[in-house]
Image (cartoon, grey):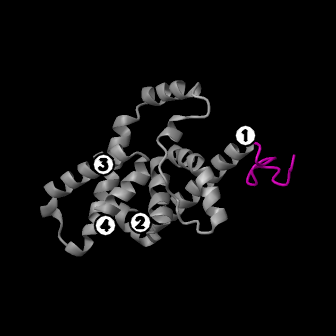
Amino acid sequence: MDRLYGTALRLTGNPDDAQDVVAEAVSKAWSKLDDLRDLESMEGWLFRILNNAFVSQWRRRRTRDEVEREAVETSDAGDFSLFQQLHQPFLLWWGTPEQQFLNDVLQEDLQKALDALPDGFRVAIVLVEVQGYTYEEVSALLEIPVGTVRSRLSRGRALLQKALWQQASEAGLVHGRHPSDSGAGDST
């Protein structure tokens, strides 16, 4: 249950939503328990149900009107955005004190960038980078080809990198264009 909750928390970024997703997934799993043919595949089966519950919840809660309303509500919030208020620790693979300090400083920006990713990219990144699953395990969990997992990770990482570069640029921490943009050598 802890792994289900941990994954749900990283997907939703909010403890209450994570509990809702886990509860929905467990309820669905219980009602479909007779469909499970191989007990050895139970973990993958549960995570597929969790992923589907997350996507369903996301679609129900994130209508276009809600997104626009949140943008208006947080535009005048100064330094405290909705994403910062909902901030949850994640991406704990950085080990040195210097890296941990940077992680602590940048967590809110990382969570904001992660939350902005399309569902497929975010789910793949959370499962591989945060939960430590292999590409093959994610492929089995999500019932998609390994190539699709790799593609989603590659595109998701690129989107994260650009979003974080933009945030760092706006904060005056980096100058010039993102290296993947045309004119990559520009240091102005």
The picture quadrant where one finds residue 35 is: bottom left
- Label 1 sits on a secondary structure element that is helix
Contact (Cβ within 8 Å) of mark 2 with mark 4: no
Query: Is 135 positioned to the left or the right of 48 in the image?
Result: right
CA–CA distance in space, label 4 to label 3 = 19 Å
CA–CA distance in space, label 1 to label 4 = 41 Å
- In the picture, the quarter occupied by the N terminus is bottom left
Q: Amino acid at mark 3?
A: Gln
Q: Would you name the residue on which mark 4 appears?
A: 44
Above or below, 45 relative to 78: below
Q: Amino acid at mark 2?
A: Val
Q: Would you name the residue on which mark 1 appears?
A: 170
CA–CA distance in space, label 2 to label 4 = 9 Å
Q: Position of residue 113 (x, y in %)?
A: 57, 46
Contact (Cβ within 8 Å) of mark 1 with mark 2: no
Of the numbered discs 3 and 2, the one sitting upstream in the chain is 3
- Label 4 sits on a secondary structure element that is helix
Q: Amino acid at mark 4?
A: Gly
- Which label lies toward us, 4 or 3? 3
Query: Is 165 positioned to the left or the right of 95 in the image?
Result: right
Check if residue 185 falls in the magenta segment: yes
Of the numbered discs 1 and 4, the one sitting upstream in the chain is 4
Query: Is 34 positioned to the left or the right of 21 in the image?
Result: left
Of the numbered discs 1 and 3, the one sitting upstream in the chain is 3
Q: Would you name the residue on which mark 2 appears?
A: 138
Q: Which residues are magenta?
A: 170-188
CA–CA distance in space, label 1 to label 2 = 35 Å
Local packing at callout 1 (Cα closer than 10 Å; few below 14, some 14-19, many 20+) is few
Local packing at callout 3 (Cα closer than 10 Å; few below 14, some 14-19, many 20+) is some
